[in-house]
Amino acid sequence: MQSYAIRVEYDGTNYVGYQVQPNGPSIQSQIEKALQLMAKLPKDQFIPTIGSGRTDSGVHAKGQVVQFDYPAEIRPENLLRALNSILPDDIRVNAAALVAEDFHARYSAISKTYRFVVNNERFPDPFTRLYSLHHPYRCDIERMQEAIEFIVGTHDFTSFCSTKTDKTNLVRTIYEASVTYDAPHFIFEFKGNGFLYNMIRILVGTLLQIGDGLKPVDELERLLKVMDRNEAGPTANGNGLYMMEVGYSEDPFSGPDAYTL
């Protein structure tokens, strides 16, 4: 068995999320089906995969990392080409690499970067409505830029985590957080050592309330202290969220045993 990692980008519109679920198609199931066909396995056998993280229904990705053991040695370039010839058009592998046995797509990660895109036009854009949250209100970016600084550092993010989480440790470290304006979109960027269930979507929902003047600029600071999900803003719809990059101490896709588009 050879261990491989692939970097995947996808349009999450038609999927229930990354992870296999009983209520609809997932990104993981599509990848595992493609690997099954490549390896010519019987229908009752499959190649299990490990993702660097989960994404919710409708959420997109540019840099999801997926790891698996394959029952034959194959050049990364050929692996990438074979998968892309089988996978549906809304999923694409943009890098592949042979990795060491101790590599783990999830536990070896040292950082993750997410982007959230908000369309601030008066009416939804028919061409980007599936890839950005529509927020037609007059929103003050300076208020949001001041507010977002409160979450940088190590904090308990209980106020910004879904009550459905299965995690007990809700402390996370945010290395970088920013919001910029590229007309007509607000672009939120978050880089941290990990993120909780719905954490970014709740942060964005609260930041937009601050930008609209519905909450004070220091609201995030207060919410970090009260540690109560009911106190925070709404969970923004997932169509504006993108998993952009997963960081490792050694980039598995930059070595001689890797191929990148």
Image (spheres, rainbow, N blue to C red):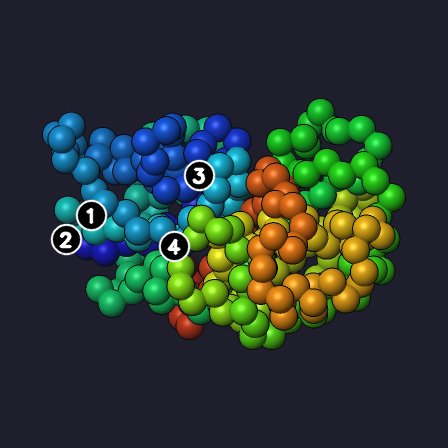
Mark 3 or 2, nearer chain start = 2
Classify 231 as above or below 157.
Answer: above
Q: Please report the residue visible at 65 percent of the width from the left and 54 percent of the height from the top.
A: 232
Q: Please report the residue visible at 27 percent of the width from the left and 33 percent of the height from the top.
A: 33
Tell me which amino acid carries mark 4.
Asp
Alpha carbon of mark 4 to alpha carbon of mark 1: how far?
Answer: 30 Å
Q: Badge 2: few (under 14), some or many (20 or more) residues near its Cα, within 10 Å?
A: few
Q: Do callouts 1 and 2 mark residues in contact (Cβ within 8 Å)? A: yes
Task: Tell whether 56 sits left or right of 2.
Answer: right
Alpha carbon of mark 1 to alpha carbon of mark 2: how far?
Answer: 5 Å
Q: Which residue is mark 4?
A: 166
**Residue 166, horizontal then vertical, whole percent:** 38, 54
Q: Badge 1: few (under 14), some or many (20 or more) residues near its Cα, within 10 Å?
A: some
Mark 1 or 3, nearer chain start = 3
Mark 1 or 2, nearer chain start = 2
Classify 84 as above or below 229.
Answer: above
Query: What's the mark number on residue 70?
Result: 1
Alpha carbon of mark 1 to alpha carbon of mark 3: how far?
Answer: 24 Å
Query: What's the mark number on residue 17?
Result: 3
Q: Which residue is mark 2?
A: 1
Tell me which amino acid carries mark 1.
Tyr
Q: Secondary structure at mark 1?
A: strand
Q: Secondary structure at mark 2?
A: loop
Q: Please report the residue visible at 49 percent of the width from the left and 37 percent of the height from the top.
A: 57
**Residue 14, horizontal then vertical, whole percent:** 48, 28
Task: Tell whether 125 sits left or right of 67.
Answer: right
Q: Secondary structure at mark 3?
A: loop
**Residue 190, horizontal then vertical, whole percent:** 61, 60
